Image (cartoon, rainbow, N blue to C red):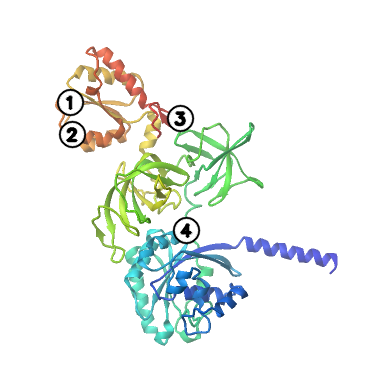
């Protein structure tokens, strides 16, 4: 080969590698009831797309375990565990990789049995598309509803209903159309908009990789053709910028950068950023990687961000868009999937891991458990393994989050046992409970001012200071705190319109330190006050205040100073 020809070959090879590296990646999950032929379908897909090595194929052909009537049991290409082969079912999530000339694919092969619901949720959590198998001889089963529900719950936008075993029905068009109509009705009920139904025979290979001549009445694409061309819908790069900090990099005194993975949006040098929880603002000086600086970074790139000014950030903090910040709260509603044999204990303290942030928290309330076979809401005091429920959670310090529908990274979390480090549950955040405002449908451009933003404006926490019969002390205290820069409001017992649950929530959400003067406070009202203010309810009658108002004001003012926020932390040590 001449030098010129050698250079040409090298150039063509480099171009081939570049094209292969730049192929789109589609992650999809598969689900189906037991014996629907899911493993056989995946095996056929890998085999007919020439994604199986010769030694793998030879091993399957020579296997003593043969469950099909054909020459090759394609399910043996995917069911890798011994128990899976012996029982003829899929147990654990198996990830398979293959590629075609158009795209690269990662398949999450998930089990279909109800007792492995947690496994399916795990496999579907990162998928862009779900392939749900329906046995054409059995029709839609309760498991089909469960699989479709979990797919919608995990935010999967595109679903393919593969109507399998059409060969056993002599490729009857009428039976396919009937099942297609039923599945489309189910998808509409669950809010799944992008649905494609494909008649297939995994065993015979009809409409798996190539279109079937035996179903000429079907004018759509074969399964692989659909997977190669379906649009990959992602909101990560179009959403507001979210950059959770995973590590602080300081190799020398001249460089201090924050490493992490972009959760959503785009980050460029010169962009303004807001640091949470401190609330400090800066600009991006540079975005760098091991290979050098970048003009921009976007999800899911892992980069290091250097800021123009020194800001104290550490693991678990977050850089966000100042004009489109996330919700910041200690309380939120979520859908949780319980994954551990040990049942849930409400009010028990667990570890909550959301993105790179770890906090302690409790599942305070279970609104209802979802019957995944009927989608009916059922009353529940606790949760067993594989249960799915709507619940309320409260954490020791606030999380920075979006709804799961808007952002899978900042809207999801896991629950960890603090003693064993076992993962107990996975959750998808649905609503903010501090104000009762749903975050699922709130347009970012019209987002309401949050409690966190008001706290940053006032530079102190909202609180309730309960004063008994000393009306003069209450008025003097209001004046003293006002002079000290607090947003303060005096509420007296005669102000009946202000002494209600709604009023307390409104005043605290607005960021006020409320002085409540009431000489005859009932037990029920006291409970309401404590519930509204949490750790920031202070009964001044328990402080043994001096009789002189001036001395009492000084003592309470010193207490109020603990509500100040400095770099994200109150002077009492409470973290925002």
Q: Are marks 3 and 2 in contact (CB under 8 Å)?
A: no
The reply to whether callout 1 and callout 3 are in contact (CB within 8 Å) is: no
Query: Judging from the image, what secondary structure is the residue with disc 2 in?
Result: helix
CA gap between label 1 and label 4 equals: 54 Å
Tell me the distance, in whole angstroms, between the alpha carbons under discs 2 and 4: 47 Å
Q: Is the residue under label 2 in contact with that under label 1 (CB below 8 Å)?
A: yes
Name the image quarter holding residue 451. top left
The residue wearing badge 4 is 126
Disc 3 + disc 4, Cβ < 8 Å: no
Taking the spot 46% from the left edge, 84% from the top edge, the residue there is: 215
Q: CA distance from mark 1 to mark 3?
A: 35 Å
- Chain-order first, disc 3 or disc 4: 4
Q: Residue at x 40, y 76 (%)?
A: 35
Q: Which residue is mark 1?
A: 518
Q: Which residue in the structure is indicated by mark 3?
A: 567
Query: Tag 3, which secondary structure?
Result: loop
**Label 3: few (<14), some (14–19) or many (≥20) C-alpha neighbours in 10 Å:** some
Gap between marks 1 and 2 measured at Cα: 11 Å
**Residue 570 x, y percent position in the rendering:** 39, 29
């Amino acid at each position: 080969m001449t030098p010129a020809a050698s250079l040409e070959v090298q150039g063509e090879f480099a171009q081939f590698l570049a094209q292969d590296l730049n192929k789109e990646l589609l992650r999809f999950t598969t689900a189906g009831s037991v014996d629907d032929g899911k493993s056989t379908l995946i095996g056929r897909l890998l085999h007919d797309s020439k994604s199986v090595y010769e030694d793998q194929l030879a091993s399957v052909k020579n296997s003593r375990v043969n469950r099909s009537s054909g020459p090759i049991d394609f399910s043996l290409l995917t069911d890798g565990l011994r128990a899976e082969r012996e029982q003829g079912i899929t147990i654990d999530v198996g990830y398979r990789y293959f590629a075609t000339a158009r795209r690269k694919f990662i398949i999450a092969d998930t089990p279909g049995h109800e007792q492995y619901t947690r496994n399916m949720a795990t496999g579907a959590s990162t998928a862009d598309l779900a392939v749900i198998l329906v046995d054409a001889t059995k029709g839609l089963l309760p498991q089909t509803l469960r699989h479709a529900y979990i797919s919608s719950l995990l935010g999967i936008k595109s679903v393919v209903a593969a109507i399998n075993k059409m060969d056993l029905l002599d490729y009857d068009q009428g039976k396919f159309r009937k099942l297609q109509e039923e599945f489309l009705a189910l998808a509409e009920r669950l809010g799944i908009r992008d649905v494609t139904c494909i008649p297939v025979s995994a065993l015979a290979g009809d409409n798996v990789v190539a279109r079937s001549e035996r179903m000429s009445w079907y004018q759509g694409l074969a399964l692989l053709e659909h997977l190669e061309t379906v649009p990959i819908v992602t909101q990560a790069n179009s959403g507001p910028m979210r950059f959770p900090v995973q590590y602080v990099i300081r190799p020398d005194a001249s460089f201090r950068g924050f490493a992490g993975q972009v959760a959503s949006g785009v980050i460029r040098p010169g962009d303004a950023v807001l640091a949470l929880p401190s609330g400090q603002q800066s600009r991006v000086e540079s975005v760098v990687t091991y290979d050098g600086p970048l003009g921009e970074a976007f999800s899911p790139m892992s980069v290091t961000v250097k800021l123009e000014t020194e800001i104290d950030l550490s693991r678990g903090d977050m850089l966000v868009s100042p004009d489109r910040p996330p919700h910041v709260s200690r309380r939120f509603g979520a859908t949780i999937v319980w994954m551990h044999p040990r049942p849930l204990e409400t009010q028990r303290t667990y570890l909550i891991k959301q993105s790179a942030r770890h906090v302690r928290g409790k599942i305070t309330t279970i609104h209802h458990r979802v019957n995944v076979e009927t989608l009916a809401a059922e009353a529940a005091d606790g949760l067993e393994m594989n249960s799915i429920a709507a619940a309320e959670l409260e954490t020791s310090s606030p999380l920075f989050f979006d709804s799961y529908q808007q952002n899978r990274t900042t809207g999801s979390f896991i629950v960890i046992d603090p003693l064993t480090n076992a993962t107990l549950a996975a959750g998808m955040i649905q609503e903010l409970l501090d104000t009762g405002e749903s975050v699922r449908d709130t347009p970012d451009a019209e987002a309401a001012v949050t409690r966190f933003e008001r706290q940053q404006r006032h530079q102190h926490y909202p609180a309730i200071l309960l004063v008994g019969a000393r009306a003069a002390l209450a008025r003097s205290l209001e004046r003293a705190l006002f002079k000290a820069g607090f947003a303060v409001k005096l509420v007296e017992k005669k102000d009946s319109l202000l002494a209600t649950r709604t009023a307390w929530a409104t005043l605290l959400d607005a960021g006020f330190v409320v002085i409540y003067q009431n000489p005859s406070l009932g037990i029920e009202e006291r409970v309401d006050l404590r519930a509204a203010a949490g750790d920031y309810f202070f009964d001044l009658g328990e402080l043994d205040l001096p009789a002189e108002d001036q001395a009492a004001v000084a003592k309470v003012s010193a207490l109020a100073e603990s509500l100040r926020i400095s770099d994200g932390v109150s002077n009492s040590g409470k973290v925002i």
